[in-house]
């Protein structure tokens, strides 16, 4: 059942024709995600898309895990992260939070960041502002009640963004986050595939955001090697909220977050 859900997500996303959202095609002030076009300004300061990566001189990257369909390999993943002293970001849906509250508390207790992935893992790019607000707030309240922490980062299911969604997310106090390195672990290509995509992707650099899933079949088995290879390359792995800028920034046409003074 879980594999079928991932396959559905893949078919909905394949219209991108891209490895990651940081490779979005930018032409005449518009980008396409999931075959949906969002009009933006052609200037850097007018870009309204999500953050896919960060411009930084520091060799830092963020490991992110999506938790939507079952407990998968949460426990071994958390143990491996602990072993290497790595803190990550887990984007959780409200349905997952409701089903597995003990894991939500465990993730927070071990010092990891929780991110909002909507209540129902729905295509939020098709929702009204009121519907978007409800999807955001329900899971936000649940996580806050369980952990005492307020989530600050958001990732849209299926990577599908509309102008309404982006505006409402930001008005709700969230920073929309995607990725520029996708391990494609949910495709079940195997351990070596995950390792290679996470550590050898041409897009990998300081400021990268790496996408993984807590319930994919081979992620936990690949994770230890992914971490030590990244650390061997000199990367410090941090939660997304410690990688991104929270003020005085712009987002360029490829989704890279840049400090204004660097422009």
Image (spheres, grey):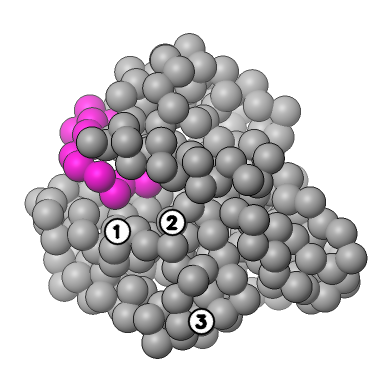
Cα separation, mark 1 vs mark 2, equals: 9 Å
User: Most extreme residue toward the top, as rendered?
Assistant: 192
Q: Residue at x 33, y 41 (%)?
A: 5
User: Quadrant of residue 161 in the image?
Assistant: bottom right
Q: Residue at x 37, y 53 (%)?
A: 91
User: Quadrant of residue 141 in the image?
Assistant: bottom left
Q: Which mark is residue 168?
A: 3
Q: Is residue 1 above or below residue 152?
A: above
Q: Who is closer to the viewer here, 233 or 76?
A: 76
Q: Which mark is residue 157?
A: 2
Residue 104 picture location, percent across and down: 19, 54
Asked whether, in this view, residue 40 is left or right of residue 61, the answer is right
Verify CB contact (< 8 Å) between mark 2 and mark 3: no
Is 71 covered by the magenta stretch? yes
Q: Which residues are magenta?
A: 66-77
Q: Which mark is residue 93?
A: 1
Residue 188 picture location, percent across and down: 40, 22
Q: Quadrant of the C terminus?
A: bottom right
**Mark found first going from the N terminus, 2 or 3:** 2
Asked whether, in this view, residue 131 is left or right of residue 55, the answer is left
């Amino acid at each position: 059942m879980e594999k079928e859900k991932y396959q559905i997500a893949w078919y909905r996303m394949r219209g991108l024709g891209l490895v990651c959202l940081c490779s979005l095609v930018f032409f005449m002030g518009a980008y396409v995600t999931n075959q949906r076009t969002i009009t933006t300004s052609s200037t850097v300061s007018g870009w309204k898309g999500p953050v896919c990566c960060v411009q930084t001189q520091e060799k830092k990257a963020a490991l992110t895990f999506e938790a939507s369909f079952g407990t998968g390999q949460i426990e071994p993943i958390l143990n491996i992260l602990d072993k290497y002293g790595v803190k990550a970001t887990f984007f959780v849906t409200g349905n997952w939070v409701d089903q597995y509250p003990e894991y939500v508390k465990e993730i927070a207790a071990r010092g990891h960041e929780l991110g909002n992935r909507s209540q129902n893992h729905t295509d939020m790019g098709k929702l009204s502002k009121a519907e978007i607000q409800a999807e955001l707030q329900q899971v936000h309240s649940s996580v806050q009640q369980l952990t005492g922490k307020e989530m600050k980062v958001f990732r849209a299911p299926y990577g599908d963004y509309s102008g309404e969604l982006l505006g409402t997310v930001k008005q709700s106090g969230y920073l929309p986050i995607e990725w520029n390195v996708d391990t494609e672990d949910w495709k079940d290509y195997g351990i070596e595939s995950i390792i290679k995509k996470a550590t050898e992707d041409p897009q990998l650099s300081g400021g990268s955001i790496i996408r993984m899933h807590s319930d994919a079949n081979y992620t936990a088995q690949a994770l230890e090697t992914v971490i030590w290879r990244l650390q061997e390359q000199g990367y410090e792995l941090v939660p997304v909220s410690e990688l991104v800028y929270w003020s005085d920034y712009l987002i360029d046409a490829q989704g890279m977050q840049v400090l204004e003074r660097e422009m």
